[in-house]
Amino acid sequence: MSPVTIRIAATHEAKVLTDLCLRSKAHWGYPKTYVDLYTPALIVTSEYIENNACFVAVNSTGAIVGFSALVITPPPANIEFLFVEPGVIGGGVGRTLLTHTLDHARNSGCTQVEVESDPHALIFYQRMGGIHFGDKPSTVIAGRLLPMLRFELEP
């Protein structure tokens, strides 16, 4: 994977980012009905981008290959989105995007960041230093548990 650049997301990219989130969720082999149920939670609006710390990873051609969003208040901060284009998963985009997002949280004065993870991403977050502190029932799929992870940030 060639290096990526991280920049602030633009409000006009909302549809592109929503589509990326849906492709990334579907990458894990979930049936279409499952992805359809999650669609409302994966819609990124221009207002959301405007009101939160949203970042995109772009490759050398300028194509968006990753997206993250951080909600800083109330503490702890929360990563609400972190999705990577399926064709580059495993190539370092997620690592670069998460590192940038955590650095932004730290620079904003946050000491903890939590993320509600897809089970397929649990190992990724743990490798990046996230501490699995419990599971949360999905608000979309009854009976499904989602891993909760916490990053402790040093000033």
Image (spheres, rainbow, N blue to C red):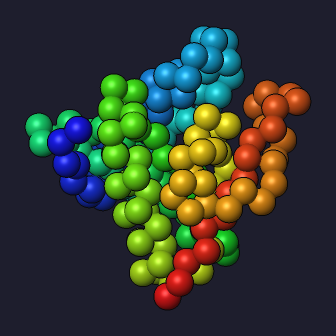
**On the picture, is 48 further left or further right than 143?**
left
Residue at the spot 72% in from the left edge and 56% down from the top edge: 132
Q: How many numbered discs, if any?
A: 0
Q: As displayed, is residue 148 above or below residue 1? A: below
Q: As displayed, is residue 25 above or below residue 12? A: above
- Among all residues in the image, which is located at the extreme right? 143
- Among all residues in the image, which is located at the extreme left? 61
Residue 68: horizontal and vertical position, in percent?
44, 51
For the N terminus, the quadrant is: top left
Residue 71: horizontal and vertical position, in percent?
56, 63
Q: From where the camera sits, is residue 16 visible?
A: no
Q: As displayed, is residue 155 above or below residue 87? A: below
- Among all residues in the image, which is located at the extreme top? 32
Q: Residue 15 lies in what quarter of the image?
A: top left
Residue at the spot 77% in from the left edge and 60% down from the top edge: 133
Residue at the spot 26% in from the left edge and 57% down from the top edge: 7
Residue 79: horizontal and vertical position, in percent?
56, 57
**On the picture, is 43 further left or further right than 63?**
right
Residue 137: horizontal and vertical position, in percent?
84, 41
Residue at the spot 54% in from the left edge and 54% down from the top edge: 127
Which of 50/42 is in front?
Answer: 42
